[in-house]
Image (cartoon, helix red, strand yellow):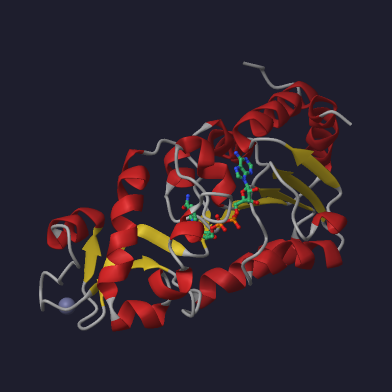
Amino acid sequence: MFVSDQFESVARMIEAANRVVALTGAGISVESGIPDFRSPGGLWTRYDPAIYATFESFVNDPSKFWVMAAELNPLLENAEPNPGHVALAELESFGKCEAVITQNIDHLHQRAGSSDVLELHGTYRTGTCLDCGRRHSFEEVKEAALGTVPACLDCGGVVKPDVVLFGEPLNAPVLHRAIELSTSSDLVLVIGCGLEVFPAASLPTYAHRNGGQLVFVNVACTAFDDIADVIMLGKAGEIMPGVVEAYRRIAGLPTE
Ligand code: NAD
Ligand code: ZN
């Protein structure tokens, strides 16, 4: 089936569902200029996460992480929400997206207008001193970094951005709510997620086991495609506005 033929059937699934949530991964922000990490040429092909992005490696030598971050930070700073992010905010305004569970750290869902965003992997916008716990804004981290490892503005300790590194636990209340939402949803829109990182990759399974439907939007296959009810193959920033447009028609809302 062509993607354009799927717009209407997915829009009808959204209309019929009482509880819709979205699970998003790095793929939804690729069209905002932030590359995902695992695709060919991605960050993990150039920086071994075992060396650059584990909590242990950060504690042993934070300078490595900040070398990688120096490449990523300008992309994060300059990125703007794309039509994929905007489409989810629109669905929320129709009462058709209760929350966005995201693996992303880029804050683009909030900037697009989604009000309930669960940041499973934290955020790059703040940092915390590993010694005294002082929170730092992104601007403070940047000011303190001056091209090297940022030092705490209070005690001079090492500041870690509030992103979840490998080997670090996820924020428990955020994870529990993500599980509760996934388990009780009628429909989960899984957008730009490679479903290779757990526990995020388990969330669609929880929905599926409890009778929830799954729509996958991705440019590539995932290991969980067999449990998807619909797979829309293509770019999130092109597909999601088509879904929203079809939903507007079905729901009798003004089309743009
Ligand atoms: P991931 O597992 O979510 O993989 C990205 C997925 O997006 C892949 O399946 C890819 O096929 C798909 N994709 C690529 N372009 C797409 C598009 N235009 N439309 C739809 N799908 C598209 O994430 P990852 O790259 O393995 O990153 C690992 C972790 O690193 C993430 O979970 C996140 O915590 C962090 N990360 C965050 C950002 C961000 O905040 N924007 C970016 C990269 C990585
Ligand atoms: Zn400190």
Identified at 47% across, 37% down, the residue is 32
x%, y% of residue 112? 47, 38
Task: Please state which of residues 182 and 232 is positioned toward the viewer in this rendering.
Answer: 232
Quarter of image, res 247: top right
Which residue is rendered at x = 33% and y = 67% of the image? 65
Q: Is residue 208 left or right of residue 97?
A: right
The residue at 63%/71% (across/down) is 198
The x and y percentages for residue 14 are 77, 40
Q: In x, y percent, where is residue 120? A: 52, 64
Please state if 218 lies on the left or on the right of 100 as rendered. right
- Quadrant position of the C terminus in the picture: top right
The image shows a total of numbered marks equal to 0
Would you say residue 77 is visible in this rendering? yes
Give the quadrant of ligand 2: bottom left
Q: Quadrant of residue 122?
A: bottom left
Give the position of the N terminus as an image quadrant. top right
Give above or below for 7 relative to 112: above
Q: Nearer the viewer, residue 115 or 11?
A: 11
Q: Within the image, what quadrant is residue 226 found in?
A: bottom right
- The answer to whether 225 is drawn above or below residue 31 in the figure is below
Q: In x, y percent, where is residue 150?
A: 18, 66
Q: Could one spot residue 125 in this view of the protein?
A: no
* Of the pair 125 and 12, the residue shown nearer to us: 125
